[in-house]
Amino acid sequence: MPNADFNVYAENKNYKAPAAIYFENQSSNADSYQWFVNGDLVSSDFDLDYEFMEKGDYTIKLIATGCDDIQNSSAYTEEIIIKKVPTRVNSKELYFEFPANNLLPDTINDPYYGLELYAVVKYNGSTVGTTDVYTVEDDFVVFNTAIKIYNLKYGSQELTVELWDANEWTNDSHLMSLSIRTREIQEDYYPEVLYLEQSGGYKAEIVLSY
C-alpha cells in the first residue's frame, strides 16, 4: 500500500510573493505521483519545485499511486501561506571585509588598522541611515544597524552601502561603495543576508529583515 508524504524546503520560511519552494517526495511503495496546487494538477514528477507568484493560501496535495492503480493510492496535503510583496526592508547588520594584504596575508591589513570608519546606507541615491563610528582593529568591521527603507519598489532601484573614513582633520574620505538592484533581492526570494563584492577585494554582507 502506498504512503504519500513530502517535506517542504525554502530559502526563507517566512514565504513572500514570489516564493520558490521545493517539495521533496518522501513517499514509499508507489510508482507514480501527482502534485496538485489548490486542486490543479501541476506536475507528475517525483519531486515538485514550484514558484508562487501571488500572495494567498495554498493547499499542496501529493497523490502517490502503486502499480498505476488509482484504487491503490495515498494522499498527503499541507497548507502554505504566501504573504504579500514586502514594501519595507530593515538593515540589521553590515559587515565589511578589506582586501587581503598580499605581503603579510596573516596579519592585520596595515592601511586600514586604526581608521575610524562609519557606513552609509542609500536607497535610490538618497541616504536612509548612517551608522556609528567604529575603530578598525582587524581586516573587517561590523556595524550594528537599525535602518529601515520604506516604500520599497522592485526593479532598477538601487540599495547601496558606502564605507567612509571619519577623518578628524580633513573632510571624511569615501573608501568604497557596493550596490544591488532591488529586482535582485526579489529574484533571490528575499534573502536574509546579501553578499556583495567589488573588484579589488572589498566584500560586504548585509543582514536584512522584511
Image (cartoon, grey):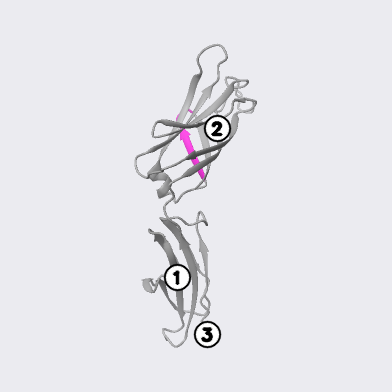
| Residue 31 falls left or right of residue 95 | left
Of the two numbered discs 2 and 1 on the same chain, state the one appearing first in sequence.
Answer: 1
The quarter holding residue 95 reads: top right
> Measured from the top left, where is residue 168 in percent x and y?
57, 14
Residue receiving disc 2: 96
Of helix, strand and loop, which one carries label 2? strand
Looking at this view, is 124 or 43 the one in front?
124
CB under 8 Å between discs 1 and 3:
no
Residue receiving disc 3: 1
What type is the residue that disc 3 sits on? Met
In the image, the segment drawn in magenta is: 193-200
> Measured from the top left, where is residue 161 in percent x and y?
48, 32
Of helix, strand and loop, which one carries label 3? loop
Residue receiving disc 1: 59
What type is the residue that disc 1 sits on? Thr
CB under 8 Å between discs 2 and 1:
no
Which residue, as the protein is rendered here, is positioned at the far bottom?
71
Which residue, as the protein is rendered here, is positioned at the far left?
156
Cα separation, mark 1 vs mark 3, equals 24 Å
What type is the residue that disc 2 sits on? Phe
